Image: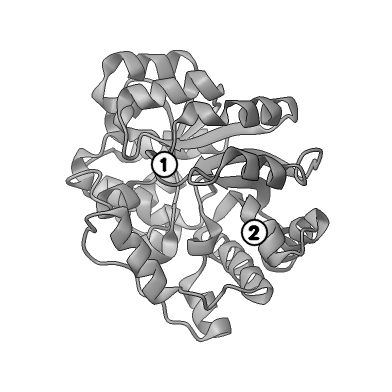
Amino acid sequence: MEFIDAVKQGSLTDIRKCKKADLHNHFVLGGSRSYLKEHAGRDIQPVKTPLHSMDEMHEWNAANIGDYFNSAEGRRMLIKAAFAQAREDGVSILEIGEDVWGLGEFFCGDIEELVGAFEEAHSEIAPEIELRLQIGMSRHCGIAYLEECLSHFWGCKAFYSIDLYGDELAQPIENFKSIYRRAKAEGFRLKAHVGEWGTAEDVRFAVECLELDEVQHGIAAAEDPSVIKFLADNHIRLNITPSSNYLLGRVAELKAHPIAKLYRNGVDVTIGSDDVLIFDSDVSKEYLRLYQCGCLNAEELDDIRINGLRKI
């Protein structure tokens, strides 16, 4: 009842005292605003009104982040900021990780150094949090390039999952099938960003083609009852980020966010932060916003919170 009461009372402080998972967090933009201001002198302010395209988001990123953290030291600071944000928000399970490109760019091609950077930050900032380390890939990259990068990751037991992100139209998702077959053989949980900009059928096809366990976003699935049923029947988890969807113009208003339709039709959903620095979207705020706009009631939000903490 603690969480339910906190939501109904509108107490962000008390919501933050309740355990919660953040399974959709891009650490580069997912860190603590106060931590970066204190340790880097960067006062990074979020967007206030909806953007109109991913290009506008990239423009914000260039203006507010730019190349300032584009170094080994800067990268480690962003990792620490992500743990600081999770700790401030009462997150008890945090899934974050490095893009395969970052291994050579920031960690001298040394997988142990990369893993060590996350583990050191974890130990220093928030050892009480369960870290699920993720391998990230951009959909813009060529398959041969990704396969070469991934050769350093295969066999590393420190990683929990693999994720694909970037422009959904950059190249057909079936191009990544061989990578996902290898990732499955390696024992990784399989995730991909789909259905933020695409269609319900794109979500179904991606799940079937790549044998996904989870979808990042996936909100377009709400457009097709058969896809909703497919996701529910196959226990496919959607890690949804409501403020991000609203501020990128994917939904007209939070009150009408498709998470309610998906949840009430039996789809496994969680609530994540996506990019805290740009969307001001820590997980506790997401729960409170969804309640206060009337999208979901407190009991439903508590069920979603508990579900995100469930071992699967």
Snapshot quadrant of residue 300: top left
Color theme of the render: one colour
* Crowd around label 2: few <14 · some 14–19 · many ≥20 (10 Å): some
Do we see residue 290 in this rendering?
yes
- Residue ID at (67%, 48%): 133
- Residue ID at (51%, 20%): 209
Identify the mark nearer the N-term, 1 or 2: 2
Snapshot quadrant of residue 39: bottom right
Snapshot quadrant of residue 162: top right
Q: Position of residue 32 (x, y in %)?
A: 50, 69
Mark 2: amino acid: Gly
Question: According to the image, label 1 marks what residue?
Answer: 170
Q: Position of residue 31 (x, y in %)?
A: 52, 65
Do we see residue 99 in this rendering?
no
Q: Quadrant of the C terminus?
A: top right
Q: Position of residue 288 (x, y in %)?
A: 33, 52
Q: Quadrant of the N terminus?
A: top left
- Residue ID at (67%, 64%): 105
Residue reaching furthest to the bottom:
41
* Crowd around label 1: few <14 · some 14–19 · many ≥20 (10 Å): few
The alpha-carbon separation of the residues under discs 1 and 2 comes to 20 Å
Residue 60 sits above or below residue 215 on the image = below
Camera-side residue: 105 or 97? 105
Confirm or deny contact between disc 1 and disc 2 (CB under 8 A).
Answer: no
Is 74 on the left or on the right of 243, as rendered? right
Q: Which mark is residue 102?
A: 2
**Which mark's residue is nearer the viewer, 1 or 2?**
1
Q: Secondary structure at mark 2?
A: helix
